Amino acid sequence: MLILVTGATGKVGRRFIAGLLDDPRFSKARIRALCHNRLLPETGRVEVTKGSIADPHVAAAAMKDVTHVVHLATCKETPAAVMDVTVKGLFWLLEAFRTSATAQQFILIGGDAGIGHFYYRHEGPITEDTPHCAYPGSYALSKVLEEVMLDQFAIQYGINNCCLRAPWIMEKDDFKYTLSFGDDVFGGPDWKALVPQGDARRYVQAGTVPLLRDADGRPLKRNFVHVDDLVSAILAAIDNPRAKRQLFNICMDRPVDYGEVAAYLAHTRNLEAVDIPSQYHSNWMDNSKAKYLLDWQPSYDLERLIDSAWQYERSQDDPRIVWYPG
């Protein structure tokens, strides 16, 4: 088994590679890490190939002798690159995969941007049958195009594929910084831009957290997943016959409720919260299909997500570096 991992230096790529190498089920598996701007160290079971999937020659060379692909590479809000890297890059990988004599399974990590997450109102739980509805921007559009392209390659050429659709992926102290009113905020909304500057400075000093409210005035519900749970889902999908040509929502059992976050932080850490009104909409991703077909179960609930983020202590050789904002 030779697994090509794109986006290998990202938070999911690094954690997936470590998890697979430690898993006795994959003791004979080898990794080919396709790296672009950053590199991983090579080991006896990990080889590194450098280049961009936007180059069809790179994609073809990276696919040589590969049996499985875990495709993680993507672009965020970078219109100048997103079509070449995310869309054409996936096309070149799939073209090389479908003509390969060794290729067995292609796993794509999708995103809830493709179904609009909290930008649009959903009248019920978001399932794998929910229609695509990208929110404004190039990133969300690219997530729709990825899923559609993967599905069409399966229809056209009968390839064995699987898409794991993940919401916002957390690790280490990420979740703590999603609630910061400072410049160190991770992702969006940019809370300091939603309150007066003086208030934002006070909130940073006091550790005050935002209690985001949805368009109906209720505490907003938004979906998250911890990187460890996403990795366990990927491992569960590899060579699983029940994953063939399937799309799965991979998320926490319940969405994060900003009201529950505020209450838990007030109770456990004596932190205050401030209401932030919005026109966003609460939503609820349903992960039942992954539980049923993959026998997968997330291990992170709201309390564990919060506690792990606030208790995480960074060492000097582990600085907080955000390669992209969300």
Image (tube, grey):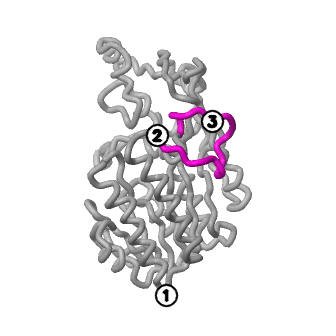
- The residue nearer to you, when weighing 262 against 195, is 195
Label 3's element?
loop
In the rendering, at what x and y percent does residue 24 appear? 58, 72
- Which residue sits furthest right? 292
Which residue does the image show at 60% across and 48% down from the upper left?
Answer: 131
Q: Residue at x 30, y 12 (%)?
A: 198
Quadrant of the rendered image containing residue 206? top left
Residue behind mark 2: 135
Q: Give the range drawn in magenta.
A: 117-135
- Which of the two discs, 2 and 1, labels the residue nearer the N terminus? 1
Along the viewing direction, whichever of 211 and 248 lies nearer the viewer: 248
* Residue at the disc numbered 3: 122
Write down the residue under mark 1. Answer: 101
Residue at the image point whose x is 33% and y is 60% from the top: 85
Numbered circle sitting on residue 66: none
- Give left or right: position of 129 versus 60: right
Work out which quarter of the rendered image holds the C terminus and state it: top left
